[in-house]
Image (cartoon, rainbow, N blue to C red):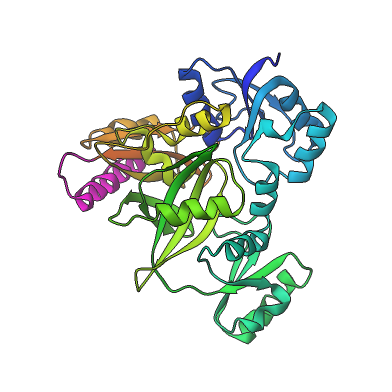
Amino acid sequence: MPTYDLGFLGGGQLARMSIQAAQRMGLKCFSLDPGHETPASQIADAETGRLDDPAAIATILASCEQVTLENEFIPAGAIREALRVTSRHESCIVPGIDALATIQDKLLQRQAFDRAGVPSPKAVPIEEAETLGFPCVLKARFGGYDGKGTRYARTREEFESHRALWEQGGWLAEEFVPFRRELAVMVCLYGENRIAFPTVETVQTNHVCDLVFPVGVDASEIAIRAVEAVGGQGLFGVELFQLEDGSISVNELAPRPHNTGHYTLDWGGPSQFEAHVRAVMGLPPVLAQSFGFAVMANLLGQEGAGDYRKGLAPALEVDGARFHWYGKAEAKPGRKMGHLNVVGGPGEPVAEVVERAKASRAAFYAGWTQ
């Protein structure tokens, strides 16, 4: 029998918070990460190794009953080789190898949406960019996130100015979407279960998620269809655009817990991390219902950051504030170091809770950088 119940490929904050959910159920967890001291290794056993190394991945597969991912950038080919070496069946991996391979290639992801009739921006190989017209968006097919691997081509001349990036291949072009706002839904699919957490609005600053709060829109149906389109199993973060006419288009999928679902740690219902663990382990599903709500504000590394505990008390002076710190060794500017959830009271306007979240974060930053 495997030594551990649940293994994680990746040892960052998403693995850490998933492990915390698993440990509450008494499950033993193990993670793999190239870092020696990671958020996950601080709370559970861990192995140091590259996430693209089949031998390192095989260590996790051989040690754990079930295995999941902390990010979608672990090469599907490396996981397949590790499965072969260990003679494990691919069903031990959630979200599934084929779904992962589709999601890792943003062009294949778009094509899967198109075949399933799921609205999303039209995408073509970079060589066919001019068929879309300008403006358009240029994206690296593999590995981009938080704005990395994305360029805009407003004109043919601007498109040509990026040639050094894309002419070696591995890029796509997609139509520019003048969206009204960005939305997100956490979706959990396994077996016959189809679960969607409430739709939230997300505000991005410099391409990084800044604030997440409830919104009076239900995008759960299209979010579920998007995950089904790639054959996904388990928990997915689905990012969407709402256009000016009110219609909704899928931006992209993440086959794992997601920044936009962190509010579920304090909203009064089950968390995305519990849903994730249950799906991977084949346990009965959560009911994604709550009698309250919370607003999430990311905490990013700052210039001059010192002891974060100096900001803790000021942040928690704000009514309803809940603090989550990831335990990362270095607070690089812009790096996700933690988040705040601020819980709303019965009947309280969302806008007022958003302002409290901003105030709590500002108080934290002031103490952290003094």
Residue at 64 percent across and 83 percent down: it is: 131
Locate the N terminus by quadrant: top right
Q: Is residue 173 visible?
A: yes
> In the image, residue 36 lies at what x, y percent?
67, 28
Above/below status of 117 relative to 208: below
Residue at 45 percent across and 40 percent down: it is: 305
Residue at 59 percent across and 70 percent down: it is: 151
Above/below status of 216 relative to 74: below
Displayed quadrant of residue 115: bottom right
- Residue 328 or residue 159, whichever sits in front: 159
- Residue 141 or residue 279, whichever sits in front: 279
Displayed quadrant of residue 289: top left
Farthest-out residue, front: 192
Q: Is residue 35 visible?
A: no
Q: Is residue 229 magenta?
A: no
Displayed quadrant of residue 90: top right
Locate the C terminus by quadrant: top left
Main secondary-structure element of the magenta-colored stretch: helix
Part of the protein shown in magenta: 344-368
232 relative to 91 in the view: left or right = left
Above/below status of 280 relative to 238: above
199 relative to 76 in the view: left or right = left
